[in-house]
């Protein structure tokens, strides 16, 4: 594997899941593969899980790990070409990227959608600049349109908990006070569409995602109908994707909050969320603390997904 930015880079999904189960059972079996190799993790945005789980995955593989928060201690980066740099950004990303590449063997990048220019966001301008100019393999730690390490961990978790071959998985929009990118729901949809699960997306009108990610999912605007018979409820907020409302909050309707009443409509479904989660906006205390909540094992599987991906990249260095 050279770069990892989406489900399309993981290859055969069943094989990837087998590799995940091996890594889970034998986390330290490949300590030699990363010896004297340096992993550089670049964060343009905050993180708890991605930061810790990816570091842990690198360490499990024997790697040295460097973490850089661009907005805390690094020079502010200009990202546009042609700009007269007489403002508050003393360094251009086109020098910074190859310099960073010269200090490491593999680079992970977190760079969220900015909601300033939909085209820039959906063209993954920052992530692609790293791929183009770093001279190193690059993997996404959540970019503008996808969060593939999260989705891979979600898939591993569903495989571990599912009670039938073809579970009904429901992605539900839920309210949030701030405008959030579509990366997690886009990516989750893309990975679910790569399985043969029954996959349903439910959201208020106006929150339709990019068709490219929705694929063959069933869109059900009636949330109670969507919940019926579900084996997994995956909650996430996202801001509007469709023009002219790109990046806007259209609703904070708390009837979409995942609560015990709606969970009672399901087939005793497990509750999933990528975290961090705002309680009693996205999900009630009862549901997230309840026996069907699997948010902690889901987060723990972030080490596994990152380790599988890093191992595949290391193999091809
Ligand atoms: N789920 C996830 O990516 O969490 P962080 O934003 O804390 O990394």
Image: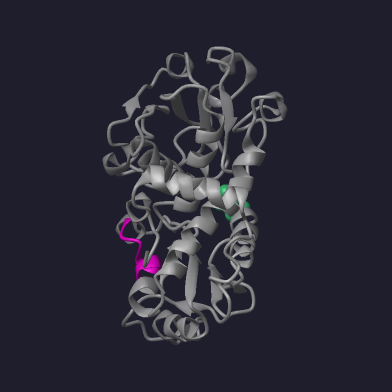
Which segment is the magenta one? 122-128
Establish if 122 lies above or below 283.
Answer: below
Q: Is residue 247 visible?
A: no
Q: Quadrant of residue 218?
A: top left
Check the picture and name the quadrant holding the N terminus.
bottom left
Where in the figure is residue 210, as x and y percent of width and height?
31, 42
Nearer to me, 119 or 277: 277
**Residue drawn where x is 56% and y is 30% of the image:** 161
Where in the figure is residue 34, as x and y percent of width and height?
55, 72
Nearer to me, 118 or 93: 93
Establish if 291 lies above or below 144.
Answer: above
Check the picture and name the quadrant holding the C terminus.
bottom left
**Residue drawn where x is 62% and y is 32% of the image:** 281
Q: Is residue 54 visible?
A: yes
What secondary structure is the stretch in magenta mostly built from? helix
Q: Is residue 124 magenta?
A: yes
Where in the figure is residue 82, as x and y percent of width and height?
31, 82
**Residue drawn where x is 67% and y is 34% of the image:** 279
Nearer to me, 202 or 246: 202
**Residue drawn where x is 56% and y is 16% of the image:** 262
280 relative to 160 in the view: left or right: right
Establish if 77 lies above or below 169.
Answer: below
Establish if 286 lies above or below 75.
Answer: above
Colour basis: one colour
């Amino acid at each position: 594997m050279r770069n990892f930015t989406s489900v399309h880079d993981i290859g055969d999904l069943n094989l990837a899941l087998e590799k995940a189960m091996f890594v889970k059972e034998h986390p330290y079996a490949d300590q030699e593969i990363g010896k004297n190799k340096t992993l550089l993790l670049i964060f343009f945005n905050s993180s708890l899980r991605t930061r810790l789980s990816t570091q842990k995955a690198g360490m499990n593989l024997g790697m040295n790990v460097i973490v850089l928060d661009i907005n805390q201690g690094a020079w502010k980066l200009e990202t546009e070409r042609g700009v007269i740099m007489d403002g508050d950004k003393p360094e251009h990303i086109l020098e910074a990227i190859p310099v960073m590449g010269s200090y490491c063997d593999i680079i992970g990048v977190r760079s969220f959608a900015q909601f300033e220019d939909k085209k820039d966001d959906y063209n993954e301008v920052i992530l692609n600049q790293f791929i183009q100019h770093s001279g190193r393999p690059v993997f996404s730690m959540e970019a503008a349109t996808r969060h593939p390490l999260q989705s891979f961990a979600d898939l591993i978790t569903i495989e571990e908990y599912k009670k039938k071959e073809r579970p009904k998985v429901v992605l539900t929009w839920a309210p949030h006070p701030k405008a959030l990118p579509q990366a997690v729901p886009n990516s989750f949809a893309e990975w679910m569409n790569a399985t043969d699960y029954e996959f349903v997306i439910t959201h208020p009108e106006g929150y339709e995602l990019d068709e490219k990610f929705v694929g063959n999912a069933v869109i059900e605007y009636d949330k109670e109908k969507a919940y019926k018979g579900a084996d997994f409820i995956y909650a996430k907020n996202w801001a509007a994707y469709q023009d002219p409302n790109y990046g806007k909050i259209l609703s904070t309707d708390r009837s979409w909050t995942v609560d015990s009443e709606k969970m009672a409509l399901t087939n005793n479904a497990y509750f999933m969320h990528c975290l961090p989660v705002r309680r009693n906006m996205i999900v009630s205390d009862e549901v997230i603390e309840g026996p069907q909540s699997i948010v902690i094992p889901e987060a723990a599987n972030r080490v596994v997904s990152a380790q599988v991906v890093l191992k595949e990249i290391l193999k091809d260095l």
